[in-house]
Amino acid sequence: MTTAAFSAAMRGKAQTVLGPVDPSLLGRTMMHEHLVIQMAHVAKAPREPAAQAEFYAPLTLETLGRIRFGGIANCDNCNLTDAATAASELRRYCSAGGRTIVDATSIGIGRDPMALTRIARATGLNIVMGCSYYVEENYPADEGVHAASEAELADRIVDEIVNGVSGTGVRPGLIGEVGCSWPITACEIKVLRASAAAQRATGAALMVHPGRHGEAPFEIAAILREAGADLERTVLCHIDRTIADRPALRRLAETGCIIEFDLFGSEGSYYAWTLPVDMPNDAARINLLQWLIAEGFGGQLVVSHDICFKDKLATYGGHGYAHILENVVPLMRRKGMADDAVAMMLVETPRRLLTFA
Ligand SMILES: [Zn+2]
């Protein structure tokens, strides 16, 4: 299919791994999860023999506490590869009223289109798949991202959205999460610009993972604006681990971007990476969201859990994909957030973003 024919056919529809759907059917949506993902490359094996044994040992109840406080120093924790486990986890999300989930896994961290179709069939959920590339450190060698031009990369992203991921026929419904490091690399800027071009060509929403620095989201917004991206259809992820300062949050909202608080359920002080801000707990996240809503930015906010490690799954004693619907929404209400503000974050803004423009 040509890109023009695709755009004409898809305008006003959303694209799931099982095909186009009417956006009115999307309902409550988590904008940033990972159902199948491999993050083992981010876990570096320690040198000491005892720590190394723990690193390669399976995740058990006995090691769970240490893994949580040590972040990611366990290989098994970093591989979510079982579609059956994902499906059983998601049944609880369905029971809690969830209807749609975005698997934001991009190229480089184990995106698996066929597994997503199996999970969609097993659960009846609308599953939207991502595309484009995660951070430079994870570009697969056979993708040739360094050698490819910006235009070639844009063509590849567009081709996936229009014709499906190589041979599978499964089409992404969102561009991202596009990975950026801090400091951002030249190749990541090229991928960002290519992703912006693909957004313009297809009408899909764009989602970007910023480096861990308070200036990173602003730098990304400037690069994207210059590249002609539609910032009102661009989600900046992980803002809850990146910016806690209210004036800076307001400045970011004023760019028009969508601010994503996507680490709900992650409340630990012992995050694996050094962060520009302390990891907030859920109550602190809600306080900031309430402030942004009061400042008039309620239509630019989305929430999620960004589950990408086993210890976050209910199967392993974690909070699971249903945590926001089961626990956070009642806390939002108790803290005085209006029902229509909650619906805006969970239903209306995701629907606007996932509907092709
Ligand atoms: Zn993610």
Image: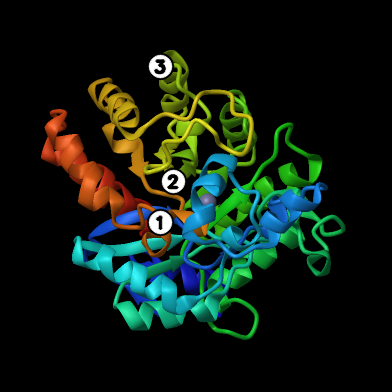
Q: State how far apart marks 3 and 1 are (Cα).
A: 31 Å
> Which residue is denoted by mark 2 in the rendering?
233
229 lies left or right of 316: right
Q: Circle 3 sits on which residue?
A: 246
Q: Residue at x 77, y 48 (%)?
A: 46
Q: Amino acid at mark 3?
A: Arg
Mark toward the start of the polypeptide (2 vs 1): 2
Looking at the picture, which amino acid does disc 2 mark? Answer: Arg
Mark 2, residues whose alpha carbon is within 10 Å: few (<14), some, or many (≥20)? many
Mark nearest the camera among 2 and 1 is 2
Residue that carries the numbered disc 1 in the rendered image: 357
Label 2: which secondary element: helix
Visible in this render: residue 17?
A: no
Q: Earlier in the sequence, mark 3 or mark 1?
A: 3
Q: Residue furthest right?
A: 147
Q: CA distance from mark 3 to mark 2?
A: 22 Å
- Label pair 2/1, CB-CB below 8 angstroms: yes
Which amino acid lies under the numbered mark 1 shown in the image of this protein?
Ala
| Most foreground residue, 72 or 228 | 72
Asked if 298 appears above or below 66 in the picture, the reply is above
Residue 12 figure quarter: bottom left
Disc 3, disc 1: CB below 8 Å? no
